[in-house]
Image: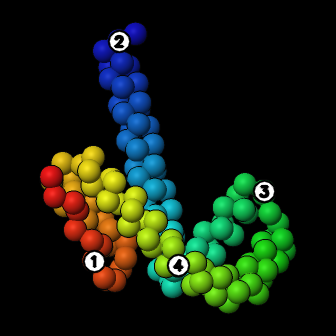
């Protein structure tokens, strides 16, 4: 094959590779944007949307089934919230205990980053307890 043909083949392969990369980034951006839209609501609503989406994908739900699953979750949302509120203090205590143990494993710089992660997770709630001193 001549140099000119090799050049054309390489240009075609390069264009294909660039298109694949651009398409991959575009799809990732689309999926992340869609996910962010769904997760932007109240935490209970976001959790519900996530569960419906996970079930729809894993079980290949039809549109009708998906709507019924969504309705079931919505019907029981108040009950779920009340149940969670009852056990929330125990859950928070366990989370604090786990976070304290994790802090013992982390370096000071990692502890600071971990604290930042926890503050973002709590969405402005009270800051987690300081890590234990060593």
Q: Classify mark 3: helix, strand or loop.
A: helix
Q: Position of residue 107 (x, y in %)?
A: 18, 48
Rendered image coloring scheme: rainbow
Q: Classify mark 2: helix, strand or loop.
A: loop
Give the answer, above or below, for where 116 lies relative to 14: below
Tally the marks. 4
| Residue at which label 3 appears | 59
Mark 3 is surrounded, within 10 Å at the Cα level, by few (under 14), some (14 to 19) or many (20 or more) other residues, namely few
* Depth check, front residue: 104 or 66: 104
| Residue at which label 4 appears | 88
Q: Earlier in the sequence, mark 1 or mark 3?
A: 3
Q: Position of residue 83 (x, y in %)?
A: 65, 82
Q: Position of residue 21 (x, y in %)?
A: 40, 44
* Depth check, front residue: 126 or 66: 126
| Residue at which label 1 appears | 127
Q: Position of residue 118 (x, y in %)?
A: 32, 68
User: Mark 3 or 2, which is nearer the eye?
Assistant: 3
Query: Where is the N terminus found, in terms of image quarters?
Result: top left
What residue is drawn where x is 35% and y is 80%? 123
| Residue at which label 2 appears | 2
Q: Distance of mark 1 from mark 3, alpha carbons?
A: 39 Å
Q: Earlier in the sequence, mark 1 or mark 2?
A: 2
Give the answer, above or below, for where 114 lies relative to 120: above
Residue 67 visible: no
Query: Seen in the image, is 42 located left or right of residue 17?
Result: right
Q: Earlier in the sequence, mark 4 or mark 3?
A: 3
């Amino acid at each position: 094959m001549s140099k000119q043909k090799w050049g054309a083949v390489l240009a075609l392969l390069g264009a294909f590779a660039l298109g694949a990369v651009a398409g991959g980034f575009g799809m990732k951006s689309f999926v992340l944007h869609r996910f962010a839209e769904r997760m932007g609501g109240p935490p209970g609503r976001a959790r519900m949307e996530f569960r419906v989406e996970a079930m729809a994908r894993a079980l290949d739900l039809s549109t009708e089934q998906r709507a019924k699953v969504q309705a079931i979750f919505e019907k029981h949302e108040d009950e779920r919230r009340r149940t969670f509120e009852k056990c929330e203090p125990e859950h928070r205590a366990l989370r604090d205990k786990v976070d304290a143990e994790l802090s013992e494993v982390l370096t000071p710089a990692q502890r600071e980053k971990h604290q930042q992660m926890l503050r973002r997770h709590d969405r402005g709630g009270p800051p987690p307890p300081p890590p234990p001193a060593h």
